[in-house]
Image (cartoon, helix red, strand yellow):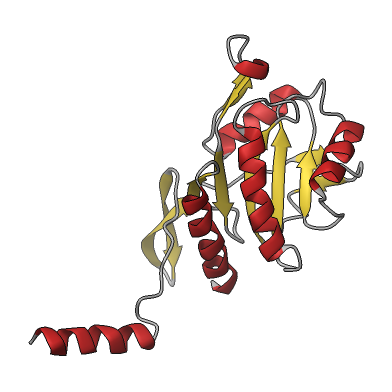
Amino acid sequence: MRFLYFMLFFSLTACGYSSKKLPILGERTLIEKKEHGKKVIDTAFHTIGDFSFKNQEGKVITEKTIEGKVYVADFFFTACPTICPIVKKEMMRVYSKYKKTEDFVMLSYSIDSKTDTVGRLAWYAGRMNIKPGNWHLLTGKYEKMTAMAAQYLLSAMEDPGAQGGFDHSGAIALIDRKRQIRGFYDGTDPKKVDELIKDIAILLKEK
């Protein structure tokens, strides 16, 4: 009996029944609307709002840049002495895997607007060997950056008691083509980033 169960499970897996479906995270709102004269209840999911920041090349990056694309996002600052170097090392693995994928983008928001100017981010990109393309290191006003962190359900703020003067999450958020959050991954944990790399592939195939 166990053998038959194993064979059935194996055949289902081979046929693709084990494919992973990523959840949609964040608050949900029920919306009442009419379809063909009947009332129906639909669900509106939390989505990332519009934004406008400059990247390491001085180009303005907005929600239009990511329109219809899968992307990942994190918050950092170039002078971070703690988790940022670890997270960026792991992000480089994602970059190496998907840097030639046209419908994939990476956004790294700097929360240190005073230090992380366009020129500073250009220097940092050169140091990390990030080529012009689909990884944008973003700078803008501090208030807008903290508001963006809240959009991603992540923390990022000034904190005089923290090393480097800022307290922020080391999580990497995975966002789908509709700007919906589909996962959070500990950017300091290589195993979690392995999961992220696999889940990006799932979203890229999702219609």
Kindly identify the residue that appears in the image at 69 percent across and 64 percent down: 98
Residue at 52% across, 69% down: 202
Left or right placement of residue 193 versus residue 135 in this view: left
Where is residue 149 drawn, in percent x and y? 60, 33
Q: Looking at the figure, which quarter contains the N terminus? A: bottom left
List x then y, in percent, for residue 158.
64, 17
Of the pair 138 and 14, the residue shown nearer to us: 14
Residue closest to the eye, 30 or 106: 106
Q: Nearer the viewer, residue 123 or 72?
A: 123
Q: Position of residue 75 (x, y in %)?
A: 65, 35
Quadrant the C terminus occupies: bottom right
Q: Residue at 81% x, 46% y: name it.
A: 61
Left-right relation of 31 to 175 = left
Q: Is residue 29 visible?
A: yes
| Numbered disc total | 0
Q: Position of residue 99 (x, y in %)?
A: 74, 62
Horizontal side of residue 86 vs 113, given as left or right: left
Residue 150 lies, with reference to residue 194, above or below; the image says above
**Which of the 4 image quarters holds residue 85?**
top right
Farthest residue in the top direction?
160
Q: Is the residue 36 above or below the residue 51 in the image?
A: below
